[in-house]
Amino acid sequence: MSLRALLLGLLLVPLQAFWIIHMELVRGGIWPTVLSLLFTCVFFVFVLAVLNLAARRWLPRLALRDEELLAVYIVLAAGASLSGCDVGQTLVHVLGAPYHFATDSNHWTDHFGRYLPERILVQNEDALKDFYRGNSSLYTWDHLRWWLGPVASWLGFILGMLAAMLSLCLLVRRQWVEHERLSFPIVQVPLAMTCSPGFFRSPKLWWGFALAGGLDLLNGLHELVPAAPVIHCKQAFQLGGMFTSAPWNAVGWLPITVYPFAVGLGYLMPHEMSFSCVIGFFLWKAQKVFWAFRGMPPPGLDARFAQEQLAGVWIAVVVFAAWTGRHEWRKLWHDRARQGSTRWVLLLGVAGVAEMICFAHRAGMTWGFGAAYMLVYLGFSLALTRMRAEFGPPCHDLYGAGPDRIFMTWAGEGAILPRNLTGMAVMYWLSRESPRSHPMPHQLEALYLGGGRLDRRKLAAAILAGGTLSGFVTFWVTLHYGYVRGSETGFFGPATWFATEGFRRLDSYLTNPKPVDHPSQAAMVIAFVASLLALHLRSNVLWFTFHPAGYAISSWWAIHLLWFPLTLAWAIKRSVTRYGGARSYRAWRPFFFGLILGEFVVGSLWQLAALLGRFTAYAFWI
């Protein structure tokens, strides 16, 4: 981890945060942080790698080593995860939502105003009104003085959270990377791009690049000139319209899409994982049809007891991973030679967890409830990290399956103290959408990429620095645009809605608490037991390849856009490996790398052109 690589990565982190927020919040319509592989990181490293090829020939002293390019990607990925619509953007809006949206009609002030943690929220209505309505400026003392204290407090929490997650990643790295040898499909593209000799000389790479990039170029020209030809890749056909009679019409939205990058990522996934994802998706559809047949159609895309089932799956994933690695944990505990090297990891984790629990208490929770909430959240984060390291899906949605759902299911809304319910609403940004741009998977992927190439302590410092810097820039850029454009009318992202949703639910919990729902508890237990059984069979029965993580990840809306590309990738990979073996699979990997890079690079260029030229460009995703 050279100093220039670290500085280059930290220099690009603010530019990337600004770009992400502009695409997701200001412009809307394209959501890079919903994807597992962040195309902004890939684009920056691709540009650096191409420039580096020229530098090696003409200016060899300035050329970056492979490890330095990899370090830049690691810092960018660690930072980008904090800038997403589910994370930093929503957090900024949480700071003022309970005060700004409290009205005489909803009675928020009467219902939970006395439980709100004033020290970490913004209470001044003049500062909030200008942020939500716009036509103002952040850079006045009357505005800044109300935000500085809460923002500093939240940045401290973010640093503690990142430290706790990184400590867990360091503890499980040896077992998951070296012993179980998880495949980490998501980061195979940046790894190959920075560390594979001759990567850019592969003809198959450029065939895939030309195919995917050409589609984006053509569709982008059609966006500007409607008379130009177009090839529809996004929602080319809607199968759901074919089912018109009950109960089959409960299938609902079922689009066919052809995202080249998703086909590329699906090829890199283990074929049993892509199979599990597609089968899991149709299991959810079958549940909707079943409940419609019973006269109980579920609302929207959701299935009945979906969140409880997801919680049962991720708990089973954590329990099974802990059980399979029990010998490694025992060896780590008794191996005195390794105890010295892990002491700083444990200290980092203890410090991070302590900060998280203390902050939960500042957010209004009791000490015991705050500790339980944060520990369950870290367990949830660990499960998501495991799923992604083993599974490598293009997206991962575990909507509403975090600690909130577990406590509500087993304790009931009325049994939880109002101050703890309020604290969960303040922390709602942590668990609403899993979140999709979760920082912990990026941390473990960074340790996998670093391997023996980068010093682990310097790598850990770079990860924490990139994440904390990105958190600060996310606060700054979101507030800046809010005061200029107005958050309520000038933003296209869902951050305002996500932030207020937590407080609307809080109001419902306090005014109309529901008792313990025993069917929900049964759904969570059944999902837990079934997932453990599936994991056991997968480990001991050769023909059983279904992974319950595929079922969990396929529960929400994003899989609707990806099920067909994953099916296509599964069929292609199965044919290649069946008739050509592992050698053919490896030989064709550059083509699928090209599909990913072509769509990401050309799609990013369209977004940069739109940012600089102030026009609406073609969005290759969603």
Image: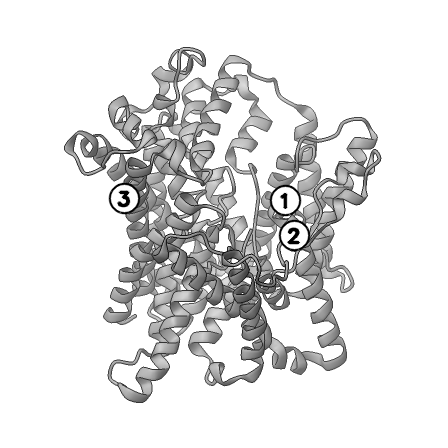
Residue at (47% x, 85% y) in the render: 198
Characterize the local packing of mark 1: few (<14), some (14-19) or many (20 or more) Cα atoms within 10 angstroms: many
Query: Is the C-beta separation of discs 2 and 1 under 8 Å?
Result: no
Residue at (33% x, 52% y) in the render: 18
Spatial CA distance of label 3 from label 1 is 37 Å
Q: Report the disc number at residue 235.
A: 2
Q: Of helix, strand and loop, which one carries label 3?
A: helix
- Where is 194 relative to 398, above or below? below
Q: Report the disc number at residue 346.
A: none
Residue at (52% x, 59% y) in the render: 225
Spatial CA distance of label 2 from label 3 is 36 Å
Q: Report the disc number at residue 476.
A: 3
Spatial CA distance of label 2 from label 1 is 30 Å
In front of the other: 365 or 100: 100
Amino acid under disc 2:
Gln
Based on the displayed image, in which of its 4 quarters is residue 68 positioned? bottom left
Characterize the local packing of mark 2: few (<14), some (14-19) or many (20 or more) Cα atoms within 10 angstroms: some
Q: Earlier in the sequence, mark 2 or mark 3?
A: 2
Characterize the local packing of mark 3: few (<14), some (14-19) or many (20 or more) Cα atoms within 10 angstroms: some
Based on the displayed image, in which of its 4 quarters is residue 610 positioned? bottom left
Would you name the residue on which mark 1 appears?
313
